[in-house]
Image (tube, rainbow, N blue to C red):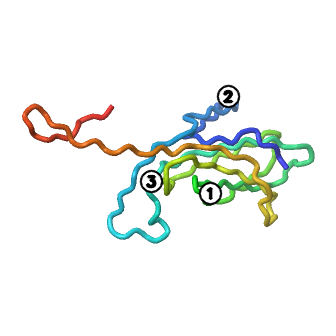
Amino acid sequence: MPRLLDFVPCVRAVVDLFTNNVTLIFLAESVQPVELEASGEPPLEVQEVRYASPGFMLFTHWWREEGEEDQSFEQRVTIVAPDGTETLLQMPTEFTLTRPFHRVFHQQTGFIGLRMAGTYWLRLYLRRTGTTEWGRQVAERPFIVQEIPASPSPTQDAGGEGEEPTAVA
């Protein structure tokens, strides 16, 4: 099995065209999500979703072990909520080890629905292509979903009329 070198959630990754080096931008250690307000009755599968976090990129970097040339593998990532509920975050991504180093960039698009604030864990699993069992977890990485503070009430100006703030710092 290939050896995992890096498993990093980030906002963006840039590959230098001359050196082929990777720069990861804005590593995701914590998020302050958007609080959702339902209009009407939401579908049953999302009724408990309280927050939404913007998507991010998952970068994995693998080292090909001896004898694994041109072999194919699949990786999948799950997200584990503070209450222990584990959910598939991305469909399995297949890759073939054609070089000693192999990179997988998976862009998680859209918003991720979250039921609660707290510490979440991203878990990475690996298997050979064509096998049915995922085997052991290869890595896990925490990230914190911060509680959203209550919104401040509108401010009063000197004339006594209520106005919404024009900027928030």
Residue at 58 percent across and 36 percent down: it is 27
Which sits in the foreground, 53 or 1? 53
CA gap between label 1 and label 2 equals 44 Å
Q: Amino acid at mark 2?
A: Phe
Task: Provide the secondary structure element on which disc 2 rests.
Answer: loop
Count neighbours of disc 3 (C-alpha within 10 A) and say few if under 14, some if 14 to 19, many if 20 or more: many
| View extreme (front): residue | 83
Give the residue number, with chain letter if any, for mark 2.
Answer: 18
Query: Measured from the top left, where is residue 160 in percent x and y?
Result: 9, 37
| 166 lies left or right of 93 | left
Label 2 to label 3, Cα distance in Å?
A: 41 Å
Q: Position of residue 24 (x, y in %)?
A: 61, 34
Mark 3 highlights which residue?
A: 51
Nearer the observer, 60 or 18: 60
* Rendering coords of residue 103 (x, y %): 71, 43
Horizontal side of residue 27 vs 167, given as left or right:
right
Of callouts 2 and 3, the N-terminal one: 2
Question: Which mark is nearer the camera, 1 or 3?
Answer: 1
Q: Amino acid at mark 3?
A: Tyr
Q: Indicate the amino acid at tag 1.
A: Gly
